[in-house]
Image (tube, coloured by chain):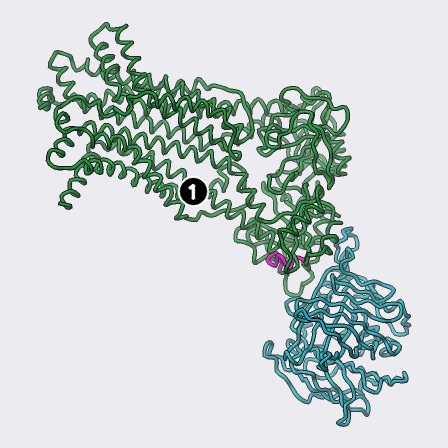
Chain colours: A cyan, B green
Amino acid sequence: MRYLNLLWLCWVSLTLAAPPQFAQVTPGHTIVFPADYGAHPAYRTEWWYATGWLQTPDKKPLGFQITFFRIATGIDDANPSEFAARQLIIAHSALSDPALGKLLPAQKSAREGFGLAYAATGNTDVKLDDWRLVRADSGQYRVTVVTPDYRLNLLLTPSQPPMLQGDRGYSRKGAKPAQASYYYSEPQLHVSGSVARNGKSVAVSGNAWLDHEWSTSVLDPHAVGWDWVGANLDSGAALMAFRIRDVHGMPLWAHATLRDAHGSTTQYGNSEVRFAPQRYWRSPRTGAHYPVAMQVQTGPLVWQLTPLQDDQELDSRQSVGAVYWEGAVSLSRDGKTAGRGYLEMTGYVKPLKL
Amino acid sequence: MNARNALLTRWLLFGEWRAYPLRALAAVAAIALGVGLGFAIHLINAAALDEFSAAVKSLSGQADLEVRGAQPDFDQRYYPQLAQHQGVALASPVLELDAVVPGRQQPLKILGIDVFRAAAIAPDFIGIPAQGRAFDTLADDAIFLSPAAMSWLQVHQGDLLRLRSGVHIVTLRVAGGLVHARAGQRIAVMDIAAAQWRFHRVGRLSRIDLKLTPGVNRAQFKAALQRELQGRLLVTQTRERTERSADMSRAYRVNLNVLALVALFTGAFLVFSTQALSVMRRRSQFALLRVMGLTRAQLMRQVLLEGAAFGVLGSALGIAGGYAVAAAALHFFGGDLGGGYFAGINPVVHFTPMAAAGLFVLGVVVALLGCAAPAMEAAHTLPAPALKSGNEAGALTQLANPWPALAALVLGALLTQMPPVEGLPVFGYIAVALLLIGTVALMPRLSGNFFRLLGLRHARSAVVTLVLARLGNAPNQAVIALGGVLTSFSLMVAMAIMVASFRVSVDDWLSHLLAADVYVRSAQGGDTGALDTQAQMTIANAPGIARVDFVRQTQLTLAPDRPDVMLIARDIDVRDPGKILPIIGAGIVPQHGLPVWVSEPMADLYGYRLGQQIVLPINGHMQQAVVAGVWRDYGRQFGAIQMRLADYRALTGDMDVNDAGLWLQPGVTPAREIATLQHLPFGALLEFAEPGEIRAVSLKIFDRSFAVTYLLEVVAIIIGLFGVAATFSAQTLARVREFGMLRHIGVTRRQILGILAAEGGLLTAAGIAVGFALGLVISLILVFVVNPQSFHWRMQLHLPWGMLLSVAALLLASAIVTALIAGRYALSGNAIRAVSEDW
């Protein structure tokens, strides 16, 4: 559900030339594990998206985000060169440390090939040079990220089965049935591992969320951005909610899923989900106005979102042309601490032109 | 007192110049020429090298190291290996092509890059696509052009660009610009996969740029990686390529600089002759000044100052002229003066104050050296005897001792046997200088003895007796006139013989090389226009063709710090390679092993001997080979290796060829065959030439590259003539009293003119005779020492008699005419007054 604006730009340019044939997302399709943990190169775009809260030995909180994108470019299959950029791998990572007052971002991109960058099929295994996300048969994910500022080595261990979003993994993003993706999440992942900064490595532990989503054509032409939240609740439940906004900030589509600790799932439809900004923060770099504190209503439930820090804006205009806010938030309900998760807000700098 | 001295200095200086402007002009011109030529060469080369290294640097971006193959491309499987190598932070694969542009002489350099990898190393080479077409940087039909390339090709964003790929045309879309490319740099960028596909280089790379992990020692890493890749790939730094290109043009530059030194030498000589004569003529003036209280030091300073004035004026003119010439030459001929060392760049001249100052000082010092002996002479003359007339010969007493001159000649002869110094014929040039100096210094003695001898034998008429007596007994004055003739004529002879020998040798070599009836080339410049096997079959099977000799030429880098050599593959008969190659001496027929034939420069530079086992890096392997023969090559100064086409194909799998020689069936004319081949599907792309045309073009290129030499020959002759004219005028004027006396004792004007003409003619003839002998010796040094040592090619000696004789005749005639004109002027005055001057 994320970064769609930049990917969209790419697609638009591609489709102008000769519309390549990509697989379409259709309702009634069954998600099959473990095959669907792996990549789906026939679809235009795909991502694995891990976010979470870590705790350092001195009890300080840290947020982390790591994303691997796979993008099919639709470049001519006739090209026999191994360099032919049929699939691109793009990765973003950011560490959120309130002590710094801002994010530590990093990004990489490469064309798939030569074993240097790939998104393997069959099971989750995505690699971009020395960045990697790989799922063992046991279900445990190993995450490695090496940036000039920090190095992450994390093990994400599932405590619950995957959570299929929408209709058994068919997640609608708009009024048209084709405006949809295949989408599942792995909430309540236990995190262990280390974070190295300034040549010093510390052991960390925490709690993470992983999204895996693939699709071909998702967005409504009027969409300019979206807000999304995924949170591990203290009760063992998991909450996912998003809304897609138009140019006036009005929701074009919204959806939420709440699964309790026992696996019983409640879906909230378009009319049952509401995002209400509580407090804004203006970015000194881009001038964008983000509703960093939000109230999210899913049916009868009202969740209060509070950011780990205000400045969790990620500027990747140089590489992929997008600026967005992607940050750790804590959740409370009825004034009581309810859980922790990540909030994503896109399309606040420059409305998407279609 | 100081003001008076200054006035005196000015008066002496300008008085002298006003009286003999021509001689002063000749001396200034010679110094200006030497300084100007030296400065122009420096400026042009500095500009070309600057531009070249900047272009190389910008092409490499901020890479720490570059990994290349010995041949223009190599297997891409090394890319993932290097990308994941310990210590490598980033590896960026590059496919570099010189794409053939239909209808253009020069190729377009294309960099096939992976934008994701190149962005961190060479961000300037990331194409900027149109709004909303971000993926054009990955598109397989898109190309990005630098502003210079766009204006050269006359295309804009959105236009289509047609380029050659083999015998086909690839049409690419100009998707955008490279706004950060260097001004004037013609360069194009496209996706590496697209470049591999469109230009038939799938699986091949030209280089891999490496960025090392921070903290890794570059030198150590480079050495370790080179050991690891030994024999397969070369690990280089950008700097090495720049240095290598500086080395490439070094020999050529040094030889041009020697020509500049020759001009300076001539200038020094002219200053010497001017000042020596002027000191001689002003003996009584100087003696009077001494008597009136001028000190020795002051007098010496005066003469030196006069010489320095020539130097300052000449140097200043030279610096200005050199700059103008450099700017003009860069504009019209490019940065290599026709030498062909820096292709595809557009250098601009920049004034370099340090070099200018250095050459300025050199010009002044040379002028001061030229007038050192006359100045000493003027200072040491005793005023009392000098106040009386006559005995001017004393001015050159230093030259009376013949031993230093003989020693110079012997030393010069010995130095010709010395080996080169760092690839430069330093000792050869010193030998030439020593021979020149020695001969000029010996000239008075030689001519004196010669004319005295002549006078003893042929003393028939009074006029002849007078002429020979004067020439035999006043050799010191003669030597000054003679020296100019001698120097300029001998250098002209030497250069003329050398160039003629070279030209005749090249001509012979071309006729041996161009044995076929018609030559076909697939493209003029660039490396994307090769003939594939299908095209080869089509040509070979065309009607009218008896036999085809296909030739594949590629570059081979044997060491990162040495210039590339050419690897040429063609059908060669091991038993008779002389049929197709200009083999020198005997060859051998190796029983086993890969036979290769190396060019003469190659044998010189790499020390290869007949029958020697050598190792060549071909297709990523160290290939054993045997030197089966050495062949003459004037085309590739840095070496070339020939091997059989079948061997080359077996080793590399490369089936393409660049050109072909066609032998026609009896009765088929070249013109008809060319017409036939032009109707092939790809016939319009081919270029045809008959041997005669290739020969004519080659010789034209030869002549162009020696244009500077020809120009200098002319200038040397003109300066020599100036010298002769000036010296004769001076001498004649100095002898006004003598002529007055002769008139008094009954010698007619006509006879005196006859004396002058005979003197002038005989002196010049003597100068020409000795000059010819000296020139011949110098040409031997140039042909057999300097050329083999600096360019590694040998030639047969050839004397251009017609040219030499006509220049000699011209020189002789102008000397006589000058003497006559000077004489008429001297005799125009009153004979009585002339004698009465002798108080």
Question: At which x and y percent is residue A33?
Answer: 90, 70
Q: Nearer the viewer, residue A78 or B402?
A: B402
Residue A136 % position (x, y)? 86, 67
Quadrant of the rendered image containing residue B40: top left
- Nearest the viewer among B27 and A191 is A191
Q: Nearer the viewer, residue B433 or B242?
A: B433
Residue B518 appearing in the image:
yes
Q: Quadrant of residue B468?
A: top left
Badge 1 local density, few (<14 within 10 Å), some, or many (20+)? many
User: Which x, y percent locates residue A45?
Assistant: 78, 67
Q: How many marks?
A: 1
Tell me: residue B297, above or below residue B768: below
Amino acid type, label 1 = Ala
Q: Is residue B308 magenta?
A: no
Please report the bounds of the magenta region as a residue range.
B117-127
Q: Chain of mark 1?
A: B
Q: Residue at x 35, y 22 (%)?
A: B405
B742 with respect to B789 (left or right): left
Mark 1 secondary-structure assignment: helix
In percent of width and height, residue A223 lies at 72, 77
Q: Is residue B31 above or below residue B235?
A: above
Residue B814 in view here: no
* Quarter of the rendering occupied by the C terminus of chain B: top left
In which quadrant will I find the N terminus of chain B?
top left
- Residue that badge 1 annotates: B326
